[in-house]
Image (cartoon, coloured by chain):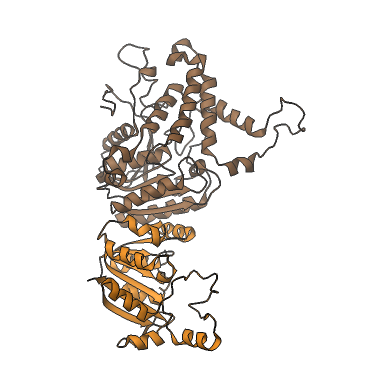
Chain colours: A orange, B brown
């Protein structure tokens, strides 16, 4: 077990949003660090979906319940209200149909926890403004023609989508690259400028 | 009472066990064998002298660790290694055997017999049911028939129904057996003969379906058996001689009437068809933790089958792990040296044992 390994900071922020003992599905769980933490430290019934076979194998070999599959096609196979939380960490921008994935998440679960790299960060804006080219940062580090991140959005864009689709934002945070919580909670505009990642806890209205 | 409506007056079950049943009787694993397998899962088969068919997977320190678990493996109903089957006595009269009159059996019937065996040990709940291919069908049948009796289920390279293609390959095998004059309409024992030609052809056909094209190419390609060049028409390709060996070694250890019974049982398997509302309805109430494993080059029970099962289990809100192991060895990969598969199985069982509170 990889229990001794320190958990990625952004995963710790997500874990803090989950009530102990709840039913959780982590979509894009990689080798299952977060679900392992939720099972062990929070006594959750936590499961994962992961697209990469190697990661799935590693997760199952560590005793974690993980299913190989794709967020775009797999979520529809779960029944309504099967979970208390469905987590989509740094994956929304890479799915084929982000809006439909969100809709499925809030169909099968009471809550959705979503994190994504914020395309509104000042550094990205500045690079685009000054260089006139697609920005490159630690989060956005692949050329436009090979990036898996096909649906970038900003924190304010995401608020708009939640409004349009009737999701209640129960909690939200902007975080820096490491996933540390950053202090622009009061203002979505400031968070959108200074936060490198957005983290949202949603439920249906 | 069998699915076909007939009853067997008595049933004998030949089985082997490994490891020790703990005081709470909570560490038992039932292993279900495939079409031509037997109960000698982790030890030399005394009849054939061959090593146990899953010695890589079952044993002390192995993924299914007999230092921790109590492993039961029984010869299936209809088999020819000691359990009741077509070669069993039909009634009181000595020497009268069932032969072709042996009732039609199903995978569910096989599992009902296994359940009786489990109860015989006083085990209320198995820690796991594990099986590959037809053994995977049995694991699925366990999960559907006796969901409350298992903690975990591991169907490997499995299918929830036998497809038209699967049935077609079996039918070729059966027709080969029928066409052998030594078959004597199933009464070959009385004549002191065996339909060896027919059974060998059946095995050869089936064997092709167990391996992938890549594996055959890798092993044999277009190599000739005695590589002296393309001289004569009598020359054999290496793959031909390999298949003939597979056929001839099979007839010494397997009974033709059993082969007919068991292949038919597989053909009849259709979990979705048995349940109105389909597969997820079949799994309603499935409370076990599932691990489904498929192999990328398996074209007999391809990954899509396992994925459909996994999705149906998801739909039934069961706890499912599913992975496709990359392998070029085809359907038989589950029997072979596949370290990724073995690590996955081991980890899954460790995780389940931890969750079940097994030390």
Q: Is residue B218 found left or right of B57 in the rendered image?
A: right
Whether residue B219 appears in this view of the structure is: yes
* Residue B230 higher or lower than B326, as above or below: above
* Picture coordinates of residue B118, whole percent (x, y): 29, 37
* Residue B89 higher or lower than B12, as above or below: above
* Residue B147 higher or lower than A160, as above or below: above
Quadrant in which the C terminus of chain A is drawn: bottom left
Residue drawn at point x = 35 percent, y = 59 percent: A75
Q: Is residue A146 found left or right of B321 in the rendered image?
A: right
Q: Nearer the viewer, residue A168 or A185?
A: A168
Q: Is residue B357 found left or right of A132 in the rendered image?
A: left
Q: Is residue A129 found left or right of B217 in the rendered image?
A: left
* Picture coordinates of residue B58, whole percent (x, y): 44, 44
Label count reads 0
* Picture coordinates of residue B345, whole percent (x, y): 43, 51
Residue at far left of view: A205
Quadrant in which the N terminus of chain A is drawn: bottom left
Dividing the picture into quarters, in which one does residue B186 lie?
A: top left
* Picture coordinates of residue B183, whole percent (x, y): 48, 16
Q: Nearer the viewer, residue B152 or B106?
A: B106
Residue drawn at point x = 26 percent, y = 37 percent: B119
* Residue A3 higher or lower than B159, as above or below: below
Q: Nearer the viewer, residue B276 or B215?
A: B276
Whether residue A201 appears in this view of the structure is: no
């Amino acid at each position: 077990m990889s229990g001794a390994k320190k958990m990625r900071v952004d995963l710790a922020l997500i874990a803090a949003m989950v009530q102990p003992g709840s039913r959780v599905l982590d979509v894009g769980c990689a080798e299952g660090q977060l679900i392992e933490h939720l099972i062990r430290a929070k006594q959750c019934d936590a499961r994962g979906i992961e697209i990469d076979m190697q990661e799935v194998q590693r997760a199952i070999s560590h005793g974690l319940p993980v299913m190989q599959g794709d967020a775009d096609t797999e979520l529809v196979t779960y029944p309504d209200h099967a979970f208390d939380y469905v987590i989509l960490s740094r994956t929304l921008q890479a799915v084929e149909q982000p809006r439909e994935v969100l809709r499925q998440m809030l169909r099968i679960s009471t809550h959705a926890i979503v994190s994504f790299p914020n395309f509104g960060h000042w550094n990205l804006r500045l690079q685009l403004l000054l260089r006139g080219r697609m920005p490159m940062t630690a989060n956005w580090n692949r050329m436009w023609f090979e990036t898996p991140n096909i649906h970038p959005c900003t924190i304010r864009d995401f608020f708009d989508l939640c409004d349009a689709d009737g999701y209640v934002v129960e909690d939200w945070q902007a975080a820096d690259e490491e996933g540390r919580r950053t202090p622009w909670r009061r203002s979505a505009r400031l968070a959108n400028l200074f936060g490198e990642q957005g983290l949202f806890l949603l439920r249906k209205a | 009472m069998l699915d076909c409506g007939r009853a067997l007056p008595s049933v004998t079950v030949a089985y082997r066990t490994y490891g020790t049943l703990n005081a709470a009787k909570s560490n038992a694993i039932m292993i279900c064998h495939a079409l031509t397998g037997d109960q000698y899962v982790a030890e030399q088969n005394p009849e054939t002298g061959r090593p146990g068919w899953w010695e890589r997977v079952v044993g002390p320190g192995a993924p299914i660790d007999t230092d921790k678990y109590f492993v039961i493996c029984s010869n299936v109903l209809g088999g020819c290694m000691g359990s009741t089957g077509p070669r069993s006595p039909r009634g009181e009269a000595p020497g009268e055997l069932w032969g072709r009159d042996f009732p039609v059996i199903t995978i569910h019937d096989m599992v009902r017999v296994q359940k009786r065996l489990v109860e015989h040990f006083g085990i209320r709940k198995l820690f796991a049911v594990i099986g590959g291919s037809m053994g995977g069908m049995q694991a699925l049948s366990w999960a559907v028939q006796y969901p409350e009796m298992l903690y975990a289920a591991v169907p490997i390279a499995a299918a929830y129904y036998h497809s038209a293609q699967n049935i077609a390959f079996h039918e070729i095998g059966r027709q080969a057996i029928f066409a052998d004059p030594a078959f004597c309409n199933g009464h070959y024992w009385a004549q002191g003969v065996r339909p060896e030609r027919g059974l060998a052809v059946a095995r050869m056909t089936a064997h092709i379906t167990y391996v992938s094209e890549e594996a055959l190419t890798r092993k044999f390609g277009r190599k000739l058996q005695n590589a002296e060049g393309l001289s004569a028409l009598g020359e054999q390709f290496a793959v031909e001689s390999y298949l003939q060996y597979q056929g001839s070694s099979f007839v010494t250890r397997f009974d033709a009437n059993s082969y007919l019974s068991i292949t038919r049982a597989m053909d009849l398997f259709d979990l979705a068809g048995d349940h109105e509302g389909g597969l997820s309805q079949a799994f309603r109430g499935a409370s076990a933790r599932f691990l489904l494993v498929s192999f990328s080059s398996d074209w007999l029970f391809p990954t899509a089958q396992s994925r459909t099962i996994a999705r149906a289990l998801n739909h039934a809100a069961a706890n499912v792990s599913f992975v496709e192991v990359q392998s070029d060895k085809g359907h038989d990969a589950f029997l072979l040296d596949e370290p990724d598969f073995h690590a996955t199985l081991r980890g899954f069982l460790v995780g389940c044992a931890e969750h079940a509170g097994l030390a």
